[in-house]
Every structure is written in C-alpha cells, then in structure tokens.
Amino acid sequence: MIDDAQLEQAAPMGETVIQPTGHAPVPRISVIVPVWNRPADIERCIRSLQKQTLPQSDYEIIIVDNGSTDSTPAVARKSGVHVLVEPRPSSYAARNLGLSAARGDYVAFTDSDCTVDENWLAKGLEALDRHPDNAVVAGPIELFSENMPTSSSVCEAYERIFAFRQERNVARGAACTANWFCRTAVVRQAGGFRSDLKSGGDFDLTRRLQAAGYPVVYAPDALVFHPARATVSELCSKARRVIGGRMMMRRNRRNPLHWWAGLTIDTLRRFQTLFTERCPLVMRARLSILLVTLWLAACWEVLLITLGGEPRRA
C-alpha cells in the first residue's frame, strides 16, 4: 500500500490530467457518469444527482459522453453539469477521462441508466470516513420497474434473482461501478480503468486495488436504483457483452473450449440457484428456458470473438 505522500495526481493509464480553471470551490467528491445514446436516462440520472442531501458545494457532477449520435450531449449540458467527450468506444475510457478532470478528494461512479437515493453521496462519504485505510466502498444496486417486485415477466424475474448481487461481489473482492466510491488519488495511482475493455473493467480495477492493499467494503445504505431489463434481447446482449469482457481480460486463453466449459459450469450453478427459489412451477420452467437461451447467446459470442470479431460495448 502506498502512503499519502505518494498519492499524487497521477493520470489514469498515462492520460493527461485536466487541470481545473477559475476559482470555483473545490468539491469534496466528484461524481462521474459515462453515457452513450441515453438522453432520457441521463436526464433522469442527473436529476437524482442534483437532489442530494449533501450540500451542492461539496460535490460536482461530471458527465462523459462516449460518442453519442443523438441528443444525449445536449440534454446533459442543458442540466448545467460538467460535460466531457470521450470518442473511444469504451465506458472505461470515458470514466478515465472523467477521473482526470475530477477535483474532489473522493470519486463516485454510477451508470447513466441509474438513479440514486437522495442520501447516496452522504452515506457513501460516511462509509469512506469510517475507513481511513483508503477503502473502495460499494453500495447496493436495487432493481426497479413498473412491475417489480412481483413481476410476472420472466426477464424481470431473472434479474431479481441474478442481477447486481453487489454484497456478494464485495465478499469476493469486486464491485460494480454502478455504485462505487474511492479516494481519487488512489484510483489514479492504480492507473485507472483498462480502457481497452468494454465489460468487466470495474471488477478488474477493484481487484487490482484490493491486491495493492486497499480493502473493498460494503455500504448497505448508499442506494442506487437500476431498471430491470425487460426483454430477452436485452439479457442476451448483456450475456454476450460480459463474456466478451472476460475474454478481453484473458487474451492468452483463446481456446473456445475453455470458455464454453466455464459458461456451462456457470449456467449449471444458476440452475442450482433457481431451484432454491420459491416461485411457481410455470415461472421456473420459463426461467430454465431463459437460462439455456442466455448460455447459447454467450457461447455464440465466444465463437465470434475466437474467429476475430470485436467484443460488444455497453
């Protein structure tokens, strides 16, 4: 672990730190949100961030547009927040750009399709203050939709069982950047996110930080809300993106048999979890079919990448 004297303003992954201009008060924490073609979502996200109980002078909001081709940048600028543009197609490259511009002692990350509880920043800072060892703090990501929590939709039922198990992630030394806090200089010193990744970069960075001596802790009252995916297409897209990210992190493992075996084991474990859930027999059967569908989608992505295809972006 490095000491305070070594926590200098290093740019992530060799990038240039964007120096602040003017005489605006220095915030305590910087919130960074990457976005790509989500005008309605980013407007809702910013609105929730601007309603924090933390004094507005204590935080700044940095939106990083990741090459949107619609009205997303204009919607973000209309909200009066700091907007940057990262053209490289990677949400992690976008997060690194935001990190280079951050002026706060601490940094918080969430996603453009999320909304946050009004006490999110206050509770995140409380957790950081309880851990002067420069811990990574991760909070829960709760699903929402018009039909939750008793949805009859098989996709939303799947999400309720398997999506965003942040407490379990933390127990394994990882965390999703949908709800993620850390000291800014610590993340910069670690080199930031791997900008070559399109999925899995949050787990990669968190595990690197933990290996460097920074613990990962769970803050159950720092709440973020994420919409449940409502279609099979959305779930298949996520399954393909996730396996693509894993393959990019382990470029030396190009044998598709390795990845197909791993996907099969993971799917069997999900079947085991499914059959411990209390749900109607018909829903369990539909969820079983969905599990097989997602397994096939991920296996197809493995084949495409093995043959030279590019991983999908978020």
Image: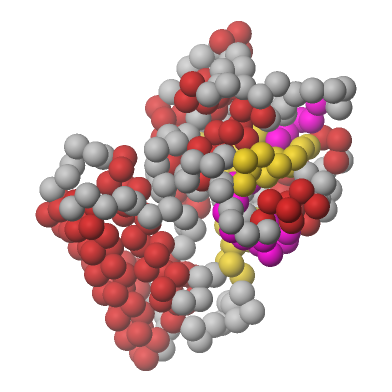
- Where does the image place residue 59, in percent across and percent down from the top left? 78, 37
**Is residue 33 shown left or right of residue 46?**
left
Side of 199 where 268 appears, left or right: left
> Where on the picture, by quarter, is residue 70?
bottom right
Please say which color scheme the image uses: secondary structure
Estimate the x, y position of residue 276 in percent, counting from the top left. Answer: 35, 73
Along the viewing direction, whichever of 81 and 273 lies nearer the viewer: 81
Q: How many marks?
A: 0
From which residue to which does the magenta span run? Answer: 26-44
Q: Residue extending furthest bottom?
A: 282
Query: In the picture shown, does residue 131 fall above or below 91?
Result: above
Residue 163: x %, y % from top left: 46, 63
* 272, 98: nearer the viewer: 98
Taking the view exactly as shown, the residue that stands out farthest to the top is: 5
Q: Is residue 127 visible?
A: no
1 magenta-colored: no
Which residue is at a point 41% across and 62% down the rendered structure image?
A: 238
What residue appears at the point 45 percent right and 70 percent down from the top-left corner?
234
Where on the picture, by quarter, is residue 102?
A: top right
Q: Position of residue 113 (x, y in %)?
A: 61, 59
The residue at 31%/50% (across/down) is 310
Decide if residue 200 is in sight here. Answer: yes
Residue 280 is drawn in which quadrant? bottom left
Q: Between residues 146 and 222, which one lies in front from this camera angle?
A: 146
Q: Is residue 74 above or below residue 299?
A: above
Q: Residue at x 72, y 28 (%)?
A: 104
Q: Image height check: is 295 above or below 36? A: below
